[in-house]
Amino acid sequence: MVNQRKILLTVTVLYTLFVLYFMFFAFGRGEASEHTSGYTFIFMPDNFISLPSPSDLLHPSLMSMVGFGNTIAFIPFGILIPWLYRVSFVRFISLFFIAILVLETIQALTFLGSFDINDALQNSIGAALGFGAYKLGFRYRSLGLNLVATAISGMVLFIALWGVGAAVDKITTKVEGPFTAINEWTDTSGHSSAGDKPDSILINGQKVTPDSNMYGAEGGDSRTFTYKSEGQTIFSFDYGCPEPTNYSGSISVTRDGNEILTGSGEDQRSNPDLFPSLFKIPLEPGDELKITIKGDMKAWDVGYTRMQYFWN
């Protein structure tokens, strides 16, 4: 019994050192700290239950592995510590969470990482899973049966967490709704346009069929249209100079007075492979776009999609 306890304590210490190495020195943290000039503290919890989807694991990235590691790597603490010491779940998880907060703070203050409350919560959830697996698994006289039951319990609890995280992510994440075309638009001079929709246009020899509308300037003049977002939306349109053209047109877009797009017929002449071009931008409530179209330039399929929850 004494030898078993010594082995457990040694394993726990070695595993703790292993995890600390990854928290403070892996992934080039030392080199990155030399180029960090400010502390990073993230106090706002995000969807910390969510884990990378199975499709993410088919082509794993560093971030997807970190997402898994933040939970899986801390499961052993939930098994080893209650195995070593008699401790209630509340006492264990409270002390563990405080310890992780201290480590996260040290990471931030030493520029070897950042303080991220989401990481601390994910680490603690991993430890809680381990604790649950230990309580469910250690019910037999045989050490081998206890370890097998604990491993199976841990996998079941982890898969359950994965499913809960996916459900929460599905419920709390907004997605694009159906496209709404702007088929009647008034420019800044007060003139209304129904948005002509030709059967097709030619852009650099490519036949393009507008689905909903097309806007442009009359007789080479300039027209400015305004769109003000009334919610979380994604505004979009295609643009280019239809043939025949002398490439004299242009288009510009500003958001709240700041220019975010400029395009011209000369750009199309110089880079024909880039046209027709698509402009697409996410907007917050109250954002205002001003779209100025000059000369031969046209914009079509102008409209927006609202960001909404899946049940809407």
Image (cartoon, rainbow, N blue to C red):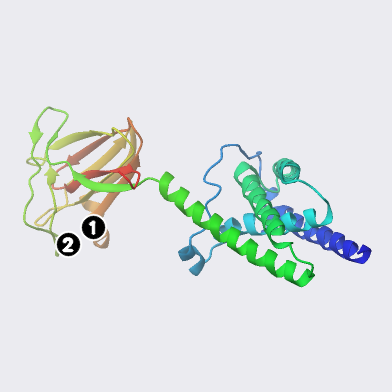
CA separation, marks 1 and 2?
A: 8 Å
Instruction: Tell me if 65 is positioned left or right of 283 in this view.
Output: right
Q: In this orientation, does residue 69 appear?
A: yes
The residue type indicated by label 1 comes to Phe
Q: Secondary structure at mark 1?
A: loop
- Asked if residue 85 is positioned above or below residue 206 in the image, the reply reads above
Looking at the image, do the residues carrying marks 1 and 2 touch, with CB atoms under 8 Å apart? yes
Residue that badge 2 annotates: 204
Residue at the spot 86% in from the left edge and 59% down from the top edge: 9
Residue 219 image position (x, y, % from top left): 6, 41
Q: Which numbered circle lies on residue 275?
A: 1
Residue 225 image position (x, y, % from top left): 19, 35
Q: Which numbered circle lies on residue 310?
A: none
Q: Residues within 10 Å of mark 1 (few under 14, many from 20)?
A: some
Residue at the spot 55% in from the left edge and 49% down from the top edge: 49
| The C terminus: image quadrant | top left
